[in-house]
Image (spheres, helix red, strand yellow):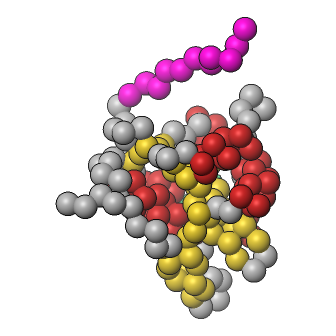
Amino acid sequence: MSTSPSREPLSNDVPVRGGERAPATVTTLAEHQVTDAVALWAAAGLTRPWNDADADCRRALVGPDSTVLAVTDATGLAATAMVGHDGHRGWVYYLAVADRCRGRGLGALLMSACEEWVRERGIPKLQLMVRRDNADVSAFYDRLGYEASDVIVLGRRLDAS
Ligand SMILES: CC(C)(COP(=O)(O)OP(=O)(O)OC[C@H]1O[C@@H](n2cnc3c(N)ncnc32)[C@H](O)[C@@H]1OP(=O)(O)O)[C@@H](O)C(=O)NCCC(=O)NCCS
């Protein structure tokens, strides 16, 4: 089975209010969109003062095993997701849809694009972490078939003095 990654963007028609369908294409975030991506993540409540989201974004874009996927519309950046893998599992971070675009299928489209990105690299599992104070979003992931894992995530900061 080939695992060579495809470069084709993922396209889909997403429903818009009123019943029509609007085309949306997932692409790699352009370097000039990094500031907008970080602003979107902040507006979506995903940034924390102790994390450097701008550096995270730039690192993911240049790393061989990571990227940032995006949907852009006429107004600007509509949605993003950072995806990568560690050789064993794929991970998603910073999934965010702009307020003005929520409920139109973009979150599901981006998760599908992340799954495709990871699958193309021969990685069989995709997972993500949900902050306890954002637990309500679990219903969204539940709709997409994601289940809670029976694990405790441990961590320590390596930049503390
Ligand atoms: C969570 C988020 C990405 C969802 O994006 P979205 O584009 O509005 O979601 P979609 O329109 O693709 O929804 C897909 C399905 O999930 C459901 N869904 C979406 N958000 C939901 C929520 N908060 N609770 C329950 N169900 C939800 C939709 O109704 C839809 O169901 P359907 O298939 O039956 O129609 C968006 O609300 C967001 O950016 N939230 C803030 C950032 C965040 O919390 N990110 C996740 C970090 S772990």
Residue appearing at x 65%, y 83% in the figure: 17
- The part of the image, by quadrant, that contains residue 5 is bottom left
| Quadrant position of ligand 1 | bottom right
Q: Position of residue 13 (x, y in %)?
A: 52, 83
Q: Is residue 18 above or below residue 129?
A: below
- The part of the image, by quadrant, that contains residue 96 is bottom right
Q: Is residue 153 in view?
A: yes
Q: Position of residue 1 (x, y in %)?
A: 20, 60
Residue appearing at x 43%, y 24% in the figure: 152
Q: Name the chief secondary structure element in magenta.
A: loop
Left or right placement of residue 46 versus residue 65 in this view? right
- Residue 7 or residue 98, whichever sits in front: 7
Magenta segment = 151-161
Residue appearing at x 78%, y 76% in the figure: 75
- On whether residue 88 falls in the magenta region, the answer is no
The quarter of the image holding the C terminus is top right
Q: Position of residue 105 (x, y in %)?
A: 55, 71
- Residue 139 or residue 80, whichever sits in front: 80
Left or right placement of residue 159 versus residue 35 in this view? left
Residue appearing at x 43%, y 43% in the figure: 85
- The part of the image, by quadrant, that contains residue 119 is bottom left
Q: Is residue 143 in view?
A: no
Count of numbered circles on the image: 0
Left or right placement of residue 21 versus residue 99 in this view? left
